[in-house]
Image (cartoon, rainbow, N blue to C red):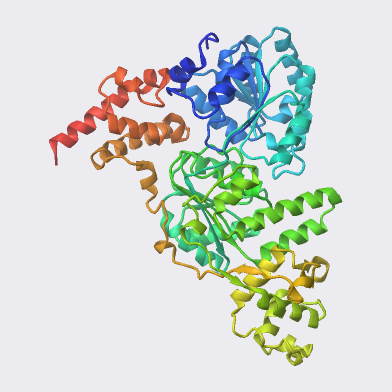
Amino acid sequence: MPSDNTALELLNSVFGYGSFRGEQAAIVEHIANAGDALVLMPTGGGKSLCYQLPALMRSGCGIVVSPLIALMQDQVDALLQAGVKAAFLNSSQDFDAVRDTERRLMSGDLDLLYVAPERLLTERFLGQLDQLYAGRRIALFAIDEAHCVSQWGHDFRPEYIQLSALHQRYPQVPRIALTATADAPTRREIIARLGLDEARVFLSSFDRPNIRYSVVERDNPRKQLQGFLADHRGAAGIVYCLSRKKVDETAVWLREHGFNALPYHAGLDAETRRAHQQRFVRDEGIVMVATIAFGMGIDKPDVRFVAHLDLPKSLEAYYQETGRAGRDGEPAEAWMTYGLNDVMIHRQRIDESAAGDEQKRIERQKLDAMLAYCEAAGCRRSVLLQYFGEAGGACGNCDTCADPPEMWDGTVAAQKLLSAAMRTGQRFGVVHLIDVLRGKRNEKIAQFNHDALPTFGVGADMDDAAWRAVARQLLVNGVIQADGERYGAIVLAEAARPVLKGETTLMLRRRLRPKSSRNSASPTRNPFSAALGDLATADVPLFEALRHWRAALAKEQGVPAYVILHDKTLREIAGRRPATTAELRNIPGMGEAKVNRYGAVLLDVVRKTLNAAAAGP
């Protein structure tokens, strides 16, 4: 690939785009001129181009450190389609494939090489890099998913810490570290651990305006999930669960209810995980039920939803996981069920962990931010953006904007619950306290004579769910705590004193009655509607014909359909109806290699489809 082309020329000729987005142009220029950079850009914002283009502009091969095998394969497949000489090195290859890739690297036959951090840090590979460096044949180092370097982050990879050796060993090679999610402390840690003190920081907006955020209070989670998915039948999506057992059970249950669901977690053998991930990426309409072991670096653009059946441990984790939806810019949904048990489990895990006091403090802060998002009375997107240091007003595309929650003075209710906890000796969990407040006579109540307490039955005017909402908000606000050593016994925190004395007022969210998903303002009811975008009705048959051609070709080549051409490009072809190669070149996403490779057959599909439509039935 020639290295003397300008960035814009390469963007157009290789990738088929006529202009940059956001700060892409500034980042590419900075790296091409040998500067170091830390790039924070949301998923789907075009991070890959920020190192792919400079690698093509500079002499030598760009070395991309990537943590996931599947991501490497997809990235390389896409680059090969665009005519870029790319390859990868990882544990999935046999001896001959590794040797062939190494030979191409050393002979100068590669523009980009993706490599796992474990392999990069071997003496053999470092020795090869030494030779390339001596001949000035390393274009750049790109460290993807750079948040993996943070020990207190949500996706720590210990081998990432050793990547600081790249700067010490190859000081003249520019480095670009990239991530879609990192709060200010994590950014500082990335800079410190990778030796990027002199690097320029490019901070893009964290907003993903096409994603609709919703949180529902957990009632009957499977029924709630089924209601949510009713508007997404046939669409690709991810359902996250906390445990492997829950993943397996949920996947089976979804299949029984007609969804094409697959499980994914670290307890499955490597071949099963690989096969399931490949089906998710390459087939349409797969629902992946997974633990957080799945998803980082997944480059599938048409994921229409991400659902959480359990609370993530931080907003960084939540942002990263929900960011796997709607990478194509089309409408997508991030949906989560959330309940009192989530709060207690996460806090108990932090308290019982072997981490030091400082790490526990940071993890509690991250959890508190996650809980504040769930209990937000205002715009959820604003809460999310503010966490990452970005201002934001009401978005109009989240549940609290669409249906603002009612607030009520919960001081008296809080006093009743606090009194029940005190009078029972701060030895019992929320379920028992609610039984006391609602005046339920059962064996446990009788055993401890709690039906004789003054607080017995004083909360009969509220149902169990309403009391759970009160308890959850008191936990979130630090008024009460759950003692992990005593099976979740509710104890009063210091903040309970002014509440009991009536010195402060507690405004709480009114519990919202669950609504039918079919009556909600869901943007993606028809899985095909997102693919259609704003395409005119008359152009839909051509678009469908193009998708059919692409699906057959993708199956023949053994690659995901989007690697060949994105839906956006097919929509442009369907809308513009090009008749010549010159007209096809003006379609976004049609670089020279793709025009040369697919131009004739694409024009043939357009011509035959239009002729058939003109001929009529």
| Residue that sits furthest to the bottom in the current view | 452
Please tell me in which quadrant of the rendered image residue 113 appears: top right
Taking the image as shown, residue 17 lies to the left or right of residue 200, namely: left
> Residue 431, percent across and down?
69, 77
Q: Residue at x 67, y 48 (%)?
A: 266
Location of residue 538 with respect to 306 vertically, above or below:
above
Taking the image as shown, residue 576 lies to the left or right of residue 102, namely: left
Please tell me in which quadrant of the rendered image residue 323 appears: top right
> Residue 415, percent across and down?
71, 77
> Residue 348, percent across and down?
77, 61
Taking the image as shown, residue 313 lies to the left or right of residue 599, namely: right
What count of labels does the image hold? 0
Location of residue 152 with respect to 28 vertically, above or below:
below
Q: Residue at x 81, y 67 (%)?
A: 494
Taking the image as shown, residue 150 lies to the left or right of residue 354, namely: left
Using the image as rendered, state which of residue 246 and residue 393 is in the foreground: 393
Tell me the quadrant of the picture where the C terminus can be found: top left
Location of residue 80 with respect to 548 vertically, above or below:
above
Q: Residue at x 70, y 7 (%)?
A: 135
Q: Is residue 243 visible?
A: no
> Residue 406, percent across and down?
53, 67
Please tell me in which quadrant of the rendered image residue 162 appears: top right
Q: Residue at x 72, y 64 (%)?
A: 344
